[in-house]
Image: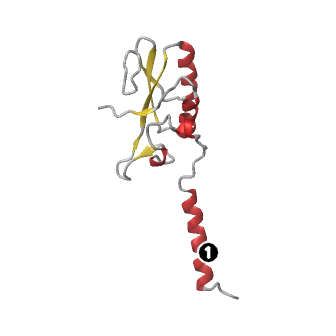
């Protein structure tokens, strides 16, 4: 029985390592510059579970944006983001105009968070999605 050589084992190990590394954070969605420009934070800092930060201090990334204060718009956004919380009358960091807009809050610790953000950014009435810091 022939055993693999040291060189063959090294090549196999390098190939496996390369495969694993390229799969660590492969983006599932292709963001166009126009849509990615609406995000006020870097998706590459968020892991597959929707958490960011050091290993011993992972947290969800909370975000905010403004939408027109209308039941139709609210229903559309609620259908996209199950973490949606409304803050009527609050401008937030996003600078919502309380007389005609409502501040929306959500977070990334949810299945498919990247798809949620992509769909929100695709809505023409959402100008920007900013990180919420709750200071």
64 vs 69: above or below: below
Give how far across and how far down residue 75 sits, in percent. 56, 19
Residue occupied by mark 1 = 12
Residue at 47% of width from left, 38% of height from top?
108
Front position in the image: 13 or 103:
103
| Quarter of the view holding residue 115 | top right
Front position in the image: 25 or 42:
42
Give how far across and how far down residue 80 sits, in percent. 57, 28
Q: Quadrant of the C terminus?
A: top left
Residue at 45% of width from left, 12% of height from top?
100
45 vs 66: above or below: below
Please indicate whether residue 99 sits to the left or right of residue 37 in the image.
left
Give how far across and how far down residue 39 sits, in percent. 48, 36
Task: Single out the residue that lies furthest toward the left.
Answer: 135
Would residue 111 be seen by someone viewing this image from the given angle? no
Please indicate whether residue 11 sits to the left or right of residue 102 in the image.
right
Residue at 54% of width from left, 40% of height from top?
114
Q: Quadrant of the N terminus?
A: bottom right
| Quarter of the view holding residue 13 | bottom right
Would residue 28 be seen by someone viewing this image from the given angle? yes
Task: Single out the residue that lies furthest toward the bottom.
Answer: 1
Give how far across and how far down residue 119 sits, in percent. 58, 32
Task: Single out the residue that lies furthest toward the right.
Answer: 1
Here the colouring is secondary structure
């Amino acid at each position: 029985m022939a055993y693999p050589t040291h060189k063959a084992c090294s090549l196999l190990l390098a190939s496996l390592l390369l495969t694993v590394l390229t799969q660590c954070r492969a983006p599932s969605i292709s963001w166009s510059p126009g849509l990615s420009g609406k995000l006020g934070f870097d998706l590459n800092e968020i892991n597959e579970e929707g958490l960011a930060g050091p290993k011993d201090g992972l947290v969800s990334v909370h975000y905010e944006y403004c939408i027109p204060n209308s039941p139709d718009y609210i229903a559309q956004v609620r259908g996209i983001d199950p973490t949606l919380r409304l803050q009527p009358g609050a401008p937030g960091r996003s600078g919502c105009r309380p007389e005609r807009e409502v501040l929306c809050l959500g977070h990334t610790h949810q299945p498919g968070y990247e798809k949620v953000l992509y769909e929100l950014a695709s809505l023409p009435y959402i100008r920007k999605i900013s990180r919420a810091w709750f200071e």
